[in-house]
Image (tube, helix red, strand yellow):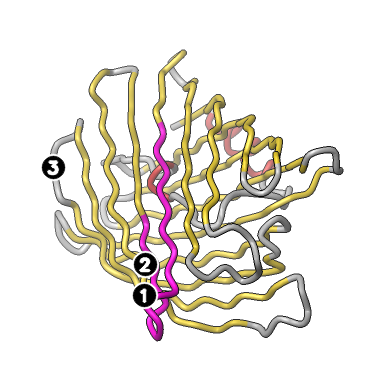
Amino acid sequence: MKLFHLILILIIFNFNFSLAQIVNVESLRRVSDTSKWSGATNLDIGLIKNTKSIFKITNKIRLQYNTDKNLYLFINDLKLEQIEDNSFVNKGIQHFRYNRKLTERLKLEVFTQSQYDAISDIKFRGLLGAGPRFKLSKSKDYRFYLGTLLMFEYEESSDNSIAILRDFRGSTYLSCSIYPLENLSLVSTTYYQPLLKQFSDFRISNETSIGFKVLKNLLFKTTFTYNFDASPIINIPNTQYELTNGLVYTFD
């Protein structure tokens, strides 16, 4: 049965659409103390309001392999969006992250990410980063983490008149995962990503999700995402937000 789930996940990986500007890895990371594969797929339907009204359909895929010392996480998001009465457009993110446990409370993170976003006029954005991840609590019902990473960013705009950007950014995040009931979860992560050579150029993102377990492997999830970019690549709103509802199917 696990082989069937793995094949299903890999089939869905063949598509290339997707998500928002900062990936909330915490909402897709699965905590596990044993060596095993795990994964999840979910379907969201949402309405976005920034300069225009946008209807979207999103499919997120997460595949993770965990051992006592190592964690490998791959994320691929598929998103179709319709802007008012215009035809559907797409966005895409592929993200790979590796964690190496150094102590009970400290891990080393390395990640790489590719992205494109027609609405934000991002033709391509590539990220490569690394840094420590700290576990701030030991409780299984209340988990808090702090990450401080350095990343290199390469960005091209769909507007050929805009120069290609190559910069180093910091990426600090604070994440909490709370499980007050067996069938209820709350995951919230806030990112702060300043440009190292100019701290007035920064991004802030928060994603907060509430999940209700419907069946053993089926979750209903409501997610609110907030993004602020002090210096977007073109003249788009500094602030964007999303509210989505959807179903998540998990396996392990």
Quadrant of the drawing holding the C terminus: top left
The residue stretch that appears in magenta: 191-209
For disc 1, the neighbor class at 10 Å (few under 14, some 14 to 19, many from 20) is: some
Most extreme residue toward the top is: 215
Comparing 14 with 225, the one in front is 225
Label 1 vs label 3, nearer the camera: 1
Q: Is mark 1 on a helix, strand or loop?
A: strand
For disc 2, the neighbor class at 10 Å (few under 14, some 14 to 19, many from 20) is: many
The image shows residue 206, relative to residue 242, as above or below, that is: below
Residue indicated by mark 2: 171
Quadrant of the drawing holding the N terminus: top right
Residue indicated by mark 1: 150
> Which residue corresponds to the image point at 41% horizontal and 58% vertical from the top-left?
204
Q: Do the residues labelled 1 and 2 touch (CB within 8 Å)?
A: yes
Structural distance between the alpha carbons of marks 1 and 3: 26 Å
Structural distance between the alpha carbons of marks 3 and 2: 24 Å
In the rendered image, residue 205 lying in the magenta stretch gets the answer yes
Query: What is the magenta segment's predominant secondary structure?
Result: strand
Residue indicated by mark 3: 138
Comparing 177 with 200, the one in front is 200
Specify the amino acid type for callout 3.
Lys
